[in-house]
């Protein structure tokens, strides 16, 4: 069995099961099985697979065919040009969340204190820490997620203060200049309609925002009024059809409310300035 033949067979299996991007997925899984980069597969397409390489590749294909996300199989996902470790304890970072990072970077000033609520893998907090010189903190209710985030921070050389608590409950009033969050926003009733990769494998605590999917947003706005210094910013990633309900949560003490759209034209990030 050569590398080329293994790729062809793996691609066919994934295609027959309607797995998205079957060729790319086969390449990623085979490269992971061999402990190589994907470029190696093309430079050595006629090389015979070792028995161990074939065993690993077959196991990874089986896991993917059962619905397990490729990122949980390989244990990694790229975000903002850096590789993050991911496990089933954390939500897989999405490219859309890079819009939230970019919106934060536009507003961060030297000396600011930044809080990421719902750290997950640490992708947002670590990226902000590495792209700026400001002090960044991040919270998560899941200690298992924080262990993954802390490992990512140490491996990437980022200084982030990780704290286990519900939202920002462990911090005193008026502590921050920037508060960012990609909160759980899937309505509980939508569980059955989610892709199996999401529904069956990603952590529920990071997915579901309550009966309407808006409950965490409501709590974040309340927390932001307590935690932000005057003139500070709250920035949140938006879920599907959540723009108007979330925008309606901001009262007279908020100004400069703006919305950033993603590449598909969907409203992705809402930013609001606290001006009491």
Image (cartoon, rainbow, N blue to C red):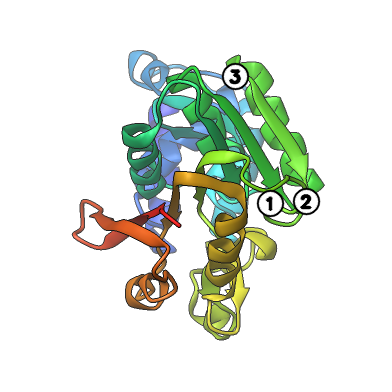
- Label 2 Cα crowd, 10 Å radius (few <14 / some 14-19 / many 20+): some
Residue 185 place in picture, x, y as percent: 52, 68
Of residue 164 and residue 90, the one placed in the foreground of this image is: 164
Q: Mark 2 or 1, which is nearer the eye?
A: 1
- Residue to which mark 1 is pinned: 168
Count of numbered labels shown in the rendering: 3
Q: Quadrant of the C terminus?
A: bottom left
Q: CA distance from mark 2 to mark 1?
A: 7 Å
Residue drawn at 60 percent across, 14 percent down: 157
Residue at 77%, 36% (x, y): give it. Answer: 147
Q: Nearer the viewer, residue 15 or 21?
A: 21
Is 268 situated left or right of 224 in this image?
Answer: left
Q: State yes or no: discs 3 and 1 in contact (Cβ < 8 Å).
A: no
| Residue at (33, 58) in percent of width and height | 255
Q: Viewed as shown, does residue 97 lie left or right of 145?
A: left
Do residues under tags 2 and 1 come within 8 Å of each other at their CB atoms?
Answer: yes
Marks 3/2: CA distance? 21 Å
Residue situated in front as seen by the camera: 41 or 80: 80
The answer to whether residue 51 is seen in the rendering is: no
Tag 3 secondary structure: loop
- Reply above or below: 46 against 233: above
User: Which residue is painted at 52% across and 75% down in the image?
Assistant: 214
Mark nearer the N terminus (3 vs 1):
3
Q: Which residue is mark 3?
A: 158
Badge 2 element = loop
Mark 1 crowd level (few <14, some 14–19, many ≥20, 10 Å Cα): many
Residue 241's quadrant in the figure? bottom left
Q: Is residue 107 visible?
A: yes
Instruction: Please identify the quarter of the rendering in which residue 109 is found.
Output: top left
Q: Which residue is mark 2?
A: 165
């Amino acid at each position: 069995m050569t590398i080329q033949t293994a790729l062809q067979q793996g691609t066919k299996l994934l295609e027959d099961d309607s797995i998205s991007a079957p060729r790319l997925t086969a390449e990623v899984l085979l490269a992971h099985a061999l402990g190589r980069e994907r470029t190696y597969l093309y430079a050595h397409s006629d090389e015979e697979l070792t028995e161990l390489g074939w065993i690993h590749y077959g196991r990874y294909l089986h896991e993917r065919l059962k619905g397990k996300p490729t990122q949980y199989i390989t244990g990694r996902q790229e975000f903002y040009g850096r590789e993050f470790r991911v496990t089933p304890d954390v939500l897989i970072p999405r490219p859309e969340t890079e819009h939230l990072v970019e919106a934060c970077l536009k507003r961060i000033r030297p000396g600011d204190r930044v809080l990421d609520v719902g750290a997950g893998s640490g992708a947002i907090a670590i990226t902000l820490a590495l792209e700026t010189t400001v002090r960044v903190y991040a919270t998560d209710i899941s200690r298992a997620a924080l262990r993954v985030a802390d490992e990512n921070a140490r491996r990437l050389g980022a200084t982030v203060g990780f704290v286990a608590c519900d939202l920002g409950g462990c911090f005193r009033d008026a502590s921050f200049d920037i508060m960012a969050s990609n909160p759980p926003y899937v309505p509980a009733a939508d569980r059955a309609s989610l892709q199996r990769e999401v529904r069956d494998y990603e952590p529920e605590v990071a997915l579901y925002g309550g009966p309407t999917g808006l409950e965490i947003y409501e709590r974040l706005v309340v927390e932001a009024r307590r935690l932000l210094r005057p003139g500070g910013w709250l920035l949140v990633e938006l879920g599907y059809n959540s723009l108007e309900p979330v925008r309606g949560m901001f009262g007279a003490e908020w100004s400069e409310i703006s919305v950033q759209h993603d590449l598909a034209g969907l409203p992705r990030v809402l930013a609001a300035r606290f001006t009491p």
